[in-house]
Image (cartoon, helix red, strand yellow):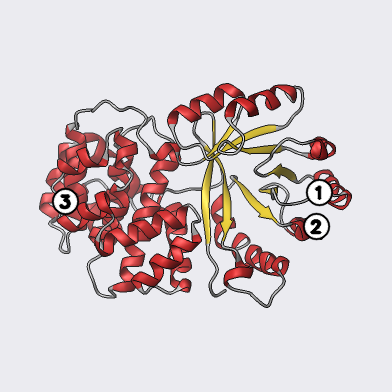
Amino acid sequence: MANSYIARQPILDSNRKTIGYELLFRDGPKNTFPEIDPDLATSRLLSDHFLSTHYSTLGKHLGFVNFPYQSLINLVPTLFPTNSLVVEVLEDCLPTPELLEAVRKMARMGYKIALDDFVPSVEWKAFLPYVSIIKFDIRIVPIEKARQFIYKLRESKIVFLAEKVETYQEFEQAKAAGFSYFQGYFFSKPEVLQRKALEPAFWTMVQLCKEVASEEIDYKKLESLIVQDVTLSYKLLALVNSSSVVSSKIQSFKQALVYLGEERLRKFVSLVAIASTQSDKPDYLYGLSIQRARYCEQLYATLNKNGETGNAFLTGMFSLLDSLLDQTLESIVSEIPLEAQVKEALLEEKGVLGTILALTKAYEQAQWQKVSELASQLGIADAELSACYDDAVKWTADLLNISPE
């Protein structure tokens, strides 16, 4: 469908494991369907996206979806399976008797109902017995005020979700206040401010990534780097052997090269390298690093059909290294022999790569106005933005072997 965007934002539990994604749609009626009823537009977006690309990659994760008032009254959510959908009642919905009846019906059918951007008021009290999740935007309702409300409902089965959690400190405060689920970009910022020494394994990772991003891969150099690190070589062989490409077990790295070929080898090395940085980070961070790398690469490829996309891939992947290594990007980049255009993109969002990175971040955060402006700047069509994002999500799920757990 032309001109429709969708992004996924992770929802994590208190152990920072991904339990679901909020699926964020661009506002179709304003941007795409001025002559079509908003609820019809929402339904079309849901059926086109939720039931196709993104539904298949949710696995057993929950999909949190916003529904406007009329869609709820018309019971549109009941078109979708109960087990994977969380029905979000938007904050601008009025608590009418009709809405209460619709919510009651859906809850009795087994749907999880969430109140989005909730602000406590007497009018919503009648809804609470049918609600599974209450979402507080901690920028609107401070954590301390939310804590009091959570305490009042401590005997209920309602689970509380903190939105717009932007720092590790806020994450810890929200946990202490009784929140169980968390949404926001707190995991995209360093948790520890002191500087850590870059370990040898990290240097190997950087060299590997540079090597596989080259236009012509030097297999001898690549092999010598792999064998330096037992963990990396083991992981790479394990990944190769678990690949559907391989019909018999691979015994050496040289054999692996033959089976994989340049393109797939580049992806595997990137995956192994990024996953070897630190093990105490949210699982979503690794996936997001790879997804971001792929999205940057795909967007760059639409601009340069025959161009080398290695630097675009590296820009996306390295853009989260501050979170993975608990350092600032400035300190990391100063020690890595990256090309100038990648450094400029990472630190200042300058140049074509910088604009692509800014566009990627805006897309992830569903800042659709900014997405449109940056896409126009680059000359990338709406349809390509959407197709590249769908590809990045699917490709990452395939690479990480994401399957229903």
Left or right, residue 152 beside residue 236: right
How far apart are the alpha carbons under marks 1 and 3?
A: 54 Å
Looking at the image, residue 334 lies above or below residue 145: below
Q: Which residue has dot 3 on it?
A: 338
Left or right, residue 270 beside residue 31: left
How far apart are the alpha carbons under marks 3 and 2?
A: 53 Å
Q: Earlier in the sequence, mark 3 or mark 2?
A: 2
Q: Quadrant of residue 379?
A: bottom left
- Can residue 261 be seen at all in this image of the molecule? no
Left or right, residue 62 beside residue 395: right
Looking at the image, residue 80 lies above or below residue 86: below
Q: Regarding mark 1 in the picture, which secondary structure is present there?
A: helix
CB contact under 8 Å: marks 1 and 2: yes
Residue found 27% across the figure and 34% down from its top: 327
User: Could you tell me the amino acid type at mark 1?
Assistant: Met
- Work out which quarter of the rendered image holds the N terminus and state it: bottom right
Tell me, for residue 106, which label it has, or none.
1
User: Could you tell me the amino acid type at mark 3?
Assistant: Leu
What is the x, y in percent for residue 395? 42, 58
Q: Regarding mark 2 in the picture, which secondary structure is present there?
A: loop
Q: Earlier in the sequence, mark 1 or mark 2?
A: 2
CB contact under 8 Å: marks 3 and 2: no
Q: How many residues crowd mark 3 within 10 Å: few (<14), some (14–19), many (20+)?
A: some
Q: Number of callouts in the render? A: 3
Q: Which residue has dot 2 on it?
A: 75
Q: Regarding mark 3 in the picture, which secondary structure is present there?
A: loop
Looking at this view, is 166 or 123 the one in front? 123
How far apart are the alpha carbons under marks 1 and 2?
A: 8 Å
Residue found 60% across the figure and 25% down from its top: 144
